[in-house]
Amino acid sequence: MTEIDTEIDTDTDTDTEITADLVRDLLHEQHPDLAGLTIREVAGGWGNQMWRLGDELAVRMQRMDPTPDHQLKERRWLPVLAPRLPLPVPTPVRYGEPSERFPKHWTVMTWVPGEPLDHGSISRGTHAAETLAGFLRALHVEAPAGAPTATDRGAHPRNCTEGFENYFQAVALDDIAADVRAVWDDAVAAQAWEGPPVWVHGDLHPANVVVSDGTLSGVVDFGDMFAGDPAWDLAAAWVLLPAGTASRFFDMYANADDAAIRRARGLAAVKCLFLMLMGQSGDRGLPGGKSHWGPVGRAALDRVLKGV
């Protein structure tokens, strides 16, 4: 569980300031037919910075990520996955290679319209639950032998206790601390995933899905995708969906047994603690902190404690 390290580490910053002029210069050099399109910065992003390119494209620039692995993974596998997924996802259309002007990778991808959920809301909860269940049923198929595996996520909760303890101690939980620990202990005690490794998004939180018309309308940022235990995505039933809709989600998903739901609930608690900690970092003005994530994480944690 190293999410917090990758989110607020300040030692991996690039020496090159990424500006609209730089993006346009790179397009002129490597994809001149796209250089005339309007370029607009997209708020948010940490490991990679996004720039809107015209109405239908975006440029994903490697920024804080110390390696290009996330982008290269998306280049390799999103074209395979996207055609069978029932929601729009960003699909690579052009590759930008490191150069003297910008010594890192960048990728031109399709733009997924909508508002990030951490700045929006879901008002059609049942529809969103059914939509998310359908998306994950389509995604969670057996992955091929060459699919990426995870090093910092994807394991059984019992192998993630250090990450849980770090977040648990860092976030002031007060009167709900015992309840949160009980959820985690139950996840640790749950039976492990015994099926074949399936495709997993791996990082479903409110900044990585988009909404429109009150429901989920797209999923973005597949840099952490891996083959493994689907419980890591099933945690989204509490992290993303409004109160009272997790049961509808699991009914529609239909492939999660009791052990998977227990693992997912514990992993959801960890994700909520992470969001709350990022919120605290933002409140303190720390690099990478996001103040608005604190209330989002706290509300999601309340949903976790209520169960399915």
Image: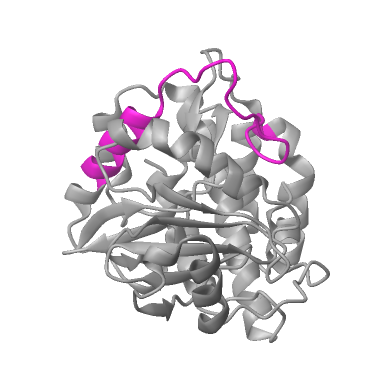
- The answer, for residue 266, to whether it is visible in the render is no
Residue 183 falls within the magenta-colored stretch: no
Query: As displayed, is residue 205 above or below residue 257?
Result: below
Specify start and end residues of the magenta stretch as a single range.
129-157
Viewer-closest of 69 and 308: 69
Residue at 68%, 58% in the rendered image = 98
Residue at 52%, 47% in the rendered image = 268
Viewer-closest of 207 and 68: 68
Viewer-closest of 4 and 48: 48
**Horizontal arrangement in the rendering, residue 152 relative to residue 97 (left or right):** right
Viewer-closest of 114 and 249: 114
Residue 143 % position (x, y): 49, 20
**Horizontal arrangement in the rendering, residue 60 relative to residue 277 (left or right):** left
Quadrant for residue 103, please give it: bottom right
Residue at 51%, 62% in the rendered image = 60
Residue 221 % position (x, y): 48, 53
List the single residue furthest toward the right: 11
Query: As displayed, is residue 73 above or below residue 220?
Result: above
Quadrant for residue 172, please give it: bottom right
Residue 44 % position (x, y): 51, 73
Residue 155 falls within the magenta-colored stretch: yes
Query: As displayed, is residue 154 above or below residue 47?
Result: above
- The answer, for residue 151, to whether it is visible in the render is yes
Residue 136 % position (x, y): 35, 34
Residue at 49%, 70% in the rendered image = 28
Q: How is the image coloured?
A: one colour
Can you say which quadrant of the picture contains the C terminus?
A: top left
